[in-house]
Image (spheres, helix red, strand yellow):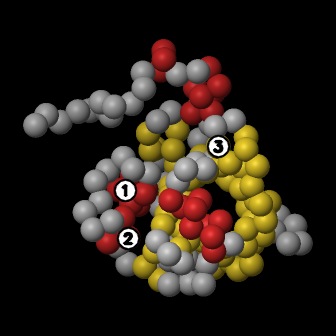
Amino acid sequence: MSIHASDPFATPDELKSPVRRLRGRLPAAVTLWTAAGERQGDKGLTVSSMLVVDGDPGRVLGLVDEESDLWEAAESAGRFAVSLLEEEDRQLADKFGGLMPAPGGPFATGEWERTEWGPVPRGRSWAGCRLVGATEKGWSLLVEAVIERVELAADPAAPLIHERGRYRRS
């Protein structure tokens, strides 16, 4: 077994579209979207392409994979939770992003709190969201949801930031 300094499965920059390369140069906070699936159990997905929109009501907009287990669970339940990940959550983000093995499933890592919107990592800031709808945009679904509840961590650590295919310190 060999240890690589970088992801040996990552697409080389010269093979990525210019749009993908531009998007990758925009630093983004890493979040975890989770939903309690009625039939298939809890599901989650690491998401960094998202916005929080202030208003009455506040909203969340995010790009998710239409074929993801998270989308199926969120669509079925009509709700989901968005948790803000911190620098120490790199492995958690990779497990839910499918980049790292997750023996026992990704929810076997860390401590979780049950909410009516889905499980959230204990001690993290999160929002409970009610699904409004989704439309196809490029190769993703643009998901829109109304924020029904916000819980802010008492002493949050630095956020987990993703840029150019890797995490960086904020």
Mark 3 or mark 1, whichever is nearer to me? 3
Q: Which residue matches tag 2?
A: 107
Graded by Cα atoms within 10 Å as few (under 14), some (14 to 19) or many (20 or more), the crowding at tag 3 reads: some
Question: For the residue marked with disc 1, what is the amino acid?
Answer: Lys
Mark 2 or mark 3, whichever is nearer to me? 3
Earlier in the chain: of badge 3 and badge 1, it is 1
- Measure how far apart labels 3 and 1 are at the Cα level: 20 Å
Please give left or right for residue 148 compared with residue 102 in the image: right
Q: Does residue 17 lie above or below 159 as drawn? A: above
Q: Does residue 95 lie above or below 129 as drawn? A: above
Residue at position x 38%, y 70% in the image: 107
Residue toward you, 11 or 31: 11
Please give left or right for residue 161 compared with residue 144 in the image: left
Q: Which residue matches tag 1?
A: 95
Graded by Cα atoms within 10 Å as few (under 14), some (14 to 19) or many (20 or more), the crowding at tag 2 reads: some
Residue at the far top: name it.
Answer: 14
- Tell me whether the residue at label 3 lies in contact with that at label 1, contact meaning CB atoms closer than 8 angstroms: no
Q: Does residue 90 lie above or below 138 as drawn? A: below
Q: Position of residue 72 (x, y in %)?
A: 58, 62
Residue at position x 39%, y 30% in the image: 10
**Quadrant in the picture for residue 12:** top left
Label annotation for residue 140:
3
- Measure how far apart labels 2 and 3 are at the Cα level: 24 Å
